[in-house]
Image: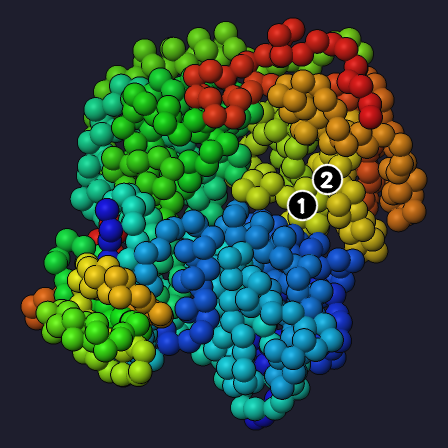
Amino acid sequence: MKINGARMVCESLAAEGVRVVFGLPGGAIMPLYDVLPEFPFRHILVRHEQGAAHMADAYGRASGDVGVCLATSGPGATNLVTGLCNAMMDCAPLVAITANVTSSSIGSDAFQEADITGITIPVTKHNFLVRHPKEIGPTIKDAFHLARTGRPGPVLVDIPKDVLQLEAEYTYPAKPNLPGYNPTTQPNALQVRKAARLIEEASRPVIIAGHGVIISQAWDELRELAEKHHIPVINTLLGLSGFPGDHQLFLGMPGMHGTAYACYASDQADLIIGVGNRFDDRATGKFSAFASRAKVIHIDIDPGDIGKNVAADVPIVADCKPALQALIREIGQCADHSGWLTQIDQWKEQFPLPKAPEDGSLSHRHVIDELWQATQGRAMIVTDVGQHQMFMAQEFPFLVPNSHFSSGGLGTMGFALPAAIGAHFARPDEPIWCCAGDGGFQMTSQELAVVSKYQLPIKIALFNNQYLGMVRQWQELFYNRNYVEVDLSGPPDFVKLADAYSIPAWRVDRPDEVSAAIQRAIAEPGPALIDFRIDPTENVFPMVLTGTPLADVIPYETKATNDASQPVRR
Amino acid sequence: MKHTLVATLDNNPFAFNRVISLFRARGFVIDSLTIGQTDVQDLMRLTVVVDGSKTAVEQVIKQLYKIVEVRKVSDLSDEQPVARELALVKVTSKPATRAEIMQLVDIYRARIVDVALASVMIEVTGDPEKIDSMVALLRGFGIKELVRTGVVAMVRGSSTREAASLKEVPAWA
């Protein structure tokens, strides 16, 4: 039977088991929207295409399946770019379908034409331009396969309007046809044996577990390896929630704003076992000083990330889960680590995370502590980018695997609200908190309309310090307190903004009001927003200064790094 | 050190665009880059000479492999491959210098492919060093125009670096 290209797209999405798509219609993609209601998946109407991309990104991460977003040609498609780049950096499985102008107009600078396949080459895992409706089924099959396998990532499929309208015979292949794509998932046995010997011999080993553990759902294996052989575990930012945050062997996050003891452990270790991480510069500090005393085992599915920043003594190219399983089978008797674990416990005792202040000022830490108390660590936490993101990574022990979502690699301000929407649709029954600063929140706050219209039970904690806080902190520490263009004081009144979207909202100024406000938000059946007025002078510590080794971590803010005077507003 | 890499990739403009985009985005320095048809209709062969440390070149290879249309990448540097480049050089030539130019052409086993009143066009094939040396000598006569194709390379003996039907499992896996 012949059907048009638009129906083929929808049939293909249905064949992939898609339940929800995020998008916004426009001229070129109208043939697709025309037939959308005939199909069993839900469409969520966003207010800006960047929102659709972040929603699909977080849907993908939270569900472990592929998130889908739709956009029209030209500006609709270019608005996806930030979201695609974010998904690329953070390995989120995503398929973006864009329409383009009619085939005969391509290349003529037609109205709302953009070379979106050309534009997105560096920010997608792969992309396609479909030339004929008979290619639609096979292309979407390939796109989903690419997005969800290997190192997951965004794939864009661009379809000219006339291809959506043309009728042809529809087929959906059972298998992808990608002769040039064959990711290595199973570990090499010889490398596993070499790694096992290193682990057995090590006296000061530490595991640095990244996002790969979560993507390959290897949290049980990670825990087994750590517990069985008494190896402490560090989580990278995106690795958080891949290991129980309250575990005795857990050291938190390393790097720029990680815990001091994670920094010391990485520095003093004689063996670093990287699992599904990429030794990002924010996590390692100065590359040349990193792991100076350690041998390195690096497990990752992407060979390109092995040996890129940090040389690996034993590289293992594989999916984390089978690699960890093979390692667990192979490792025999390990050396005694009790001295090492005692040393780490001493560091934990000596350099605990800074405490929330008791001078009546409202700290990020007050809010995060109460959030944890209220949820007992059992909620999906979506963070934006900046100070609150780092405080959350430090202060909130994640207990549910894959419950922390943040923009790690790209550091996209504005990620949190649309990402919370996407994560909610992936796991609608779980409580969810969207945490954002006042700067990032304003970059995508138009998606409040989506939250309100669909009455999503997303609770928004706004860490409002009236500043681009992280930039202000850097100006304070590295630019001689020359505070330039970081002052966000004044409009908007976020309570009124929420009110404009019919979302209940309150303002909280004091630490003693936090708990009640959170309970009130949880009691709301639908969305709620709390405008937490955070002390504008609060800085994130510990801190490893750019280009310095982890050993030089500054655990606490001191007079030398900051005096208590109010920043000068400009 | 200079490394000569050959890659087999799908014959479409996207594949070529992705390769070029990769070199640009990751700041890999290219000495020369050539792309052309292989014996298999759907596959192109890319030859690229990059200058860098062994680790840097390994990174180039790994990143090339991540391109879906790239089937196979080989570093030929350790295999003493046959590496050839072609150059066309238009040289100023007066009756007084023509004989001398023709002598040079003979020595380098090059050819004169066009003669005009005040110039000759020389075609020379060989490894890049040979072309460098001939160009240096021709400079004395006055080079009016010069174009080089960039290197193409092939390993000696019966083994091939031709496209496999499936992406081969690279050595590090």
Q: Residue at x 47, y 53 (%)?
A: B25
For mark 2, name the chain: A
Residue A77 image offset from top left, x and y in percent:
66, 65
Q: Nearer the viewer, residue A316 or A41?
A: A316
Mark identifier at residue A355:
none
Check disc 2: other Cα within 10 Å, few if <14, some if 14-19, many if 20+: many
Q: Chain of mark 1?
A: A
* Residue A436 visible from this viewpoint: yes
Q: Is residue A373 above or below residue A297?
A: above
**What residue do we see at 51% from left, 71% from top?**
A128
Please, what secondary structure does the residue beneath circle 2 have?
Answer: helix
Residue beneath the point at 65% across and 37% down: A385
Amino acid bearing label 1: Phe
3D distance between C-alphas at marks 1 and 2: 8 Å
CB-based contact (under 8 Å), mark 1 and mark 2 = yes
Rendering quarter of residue A461: top right
Disc count in the image? 2
Callout 1: helix, strand or loop? Answer: loop
- N-terminal-most mark, 1 or 2: 1
Disc sitting over residue A440 in the figure? 2
Image quadrant where residue A560 sits? top right
Residue A415 numbered tag: 1
Which quadrant would residue A480 be assigned to in this image?
top right
Q: In the image, is A393 to the left or to the right of B158? A: right
**Please, what is the three-letter code of the amino acid marked with disc 2?**
Gly
